[in-house]
Image: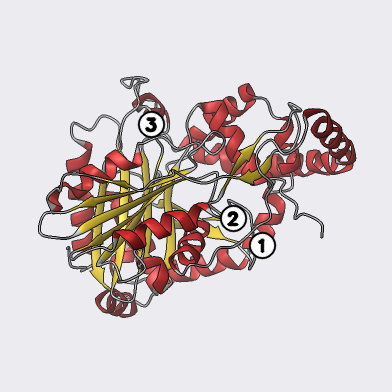
Amino acid sequence: MPRPDNTLDYLDQGSFQGLRALGRGPVIQFIWIYDGPVDLDGVGRLQRNLGSGGLLGRRVERSPLPFGRHRWVRAQGPSELDVSTAARTPADIDAWADERAYLPVDPEHGPPWHLGVQPLQGGGAAISLVVSHTIGDAMAIVEAVTDAAQDTCRDLGYPPPQNRPRRAALRTDLGESTKSVPSLITALIGGARVAREQRAELAASARTVSAPVTTGDDRPLQLPTSVVHVDSATWDQRAKSLGGTSNTLFAALCTRVGHELGRVDDSGRAMLSFPVSVRRPGDTRGNALATITVLADPELVTSDLAALRQDIRRELAGVDEWFRVMTAPLPLTPLVPKAAMRRMEKAVLKVGRPIGCSNVGELPAAANRPDGAADADRVWVRMVEPGISSATLERMGGHLFVVCCRTTASVSVTFTAWTPGAADNRALLVEAVNRAMADLDLPIS
């Protein structure tokens, strides 16, 4: 039986090459909180299952060719579950989550992810899973955790590391690169088309950015995070009363927080950037994502979500065409040198003040049961980028990324932000979130 193709998708190769060019890359963190006891044997089984197969049981192995396609190979995560020896108070969970989020992960050298448990005073515990974004997006992680929590180990057929002798690997990859020449010509044409179509939009977005702030430095920093939890029934009732859906209410909350932090264009509108999953059943891509962008009126969303709902629906209807057009140049990815990757980031940093809005949706029941025995009392998700500096963030005009996920009981929304020149970014973020929640008549918990 032929072995499944383990060649990285172009989006995944681009993610990996970007990480190596910039020296940093985003990670996704899931936090589960139990108010009562946790079955540590169950969490240990989750760890073993995550590393034994599926979308997290792998890492990247480079092609021996500088312009070759990289491949997935089998790889486990850490061999032992990391359980803190000293209990902390529930008030210390945020600090512990930060410590876990900034522990190293690496999609090539490993570990590609890590799992940790923090016992809490009073008998509860917190569990953290941190995954390199190159290995998997949020939906890939949800799928992997769901399978692992149910003792379902998905064998993707990946070979062990260094399975190919170098001479054979060179011959195979060179042959595949030669065969890809026609697709490279098509990619060049597609790239030229995208550049033409995006030129006016990028220029307009760039004009909305004020003069760059030059007070930052190149020291890595940790971005502040604020998390809110709302009862699911209360959340849905409020969305309905405003003429929207759960997703539209999430977008409205992102809009209001962006407004409070000054992340709006010259007309006062917020630029909402939504990653949209295009993952299919059996998909092995790490990142199966498209993107839509919607401009939202911060004043209107407090009283009526109908217009925002319509705008989001319209953009979602065109996401397949967007994905086809925007991914057309991707076959060129293996040919892009590191210096060009760094220049590309600088160009992107000049474009507007986008607000990242990632809605993971409702988690499968098993994904909220990391110990395999009981539902977590709370769960939240965030994306951070270890190694990013204040100088980079200031060139970006700041940062705001928001992640929403829900269970049958509650909705959690996690805000990670940085505002140039702020004396206390954490206090500024918490105040902005509190005001936005009040503006939308949502209870704060």
Name above or below for residue 7 compared with residue 282.
above
- Kind of residue at disc 3: Leu
Q: Earlier in the sequence, mark 2 or mark 1?
A: 2
The kind of secondary structure element at disc 3 is helix
Q: Mark 2 highlights which residue?
A: 290
Q: Position of residue 315 (x, y in %)?
A: 56, 63
Q: Earlier in the sequence, mark 3 or mark 1?
A: 1
- Kind of residue at disc 2: Ala
User: What residue lies at 45% left-to-right and 61% top-to-bottom?
Assistant: 145
Please identify the quadrant where the C terminus is shown.
bottom left
CB contact under 8 Å: marks 2 and 1: yes
Q: Mark 3 highlights which residue?
A: 393
Name above or below for residue 416 compared with residue 291.
above
The kind of secondary structure element at disc 2 is strand
Res 197 → quadrant: top right
Q: Mark 1 highlights which residue?
A: 320
Q: Earlier in the sequence, mark 3 or mark 2?
A: 2
Q: Position of residue 251 (x, y in %)?
A: 39, 62
- Kind of residue at disc 1: Asp
**Residue 148 can be seen, yes or no:** yes
User: Observer-nearest residue: 61 or 278?
Assistant: 61
| Residue 61, disc | none
User: What residue lies at 28% left-to-right and 80% top-to-bottom?
Assistant: 237
Q: How many marks?
A: 3
Please tell me how crowded label 1 is: few (under 14), some (14-19), or many (20+) other residues with Cα within 10 Å.
some
Q: Position of residue 367 (x, y in %)?
A: 41, 66
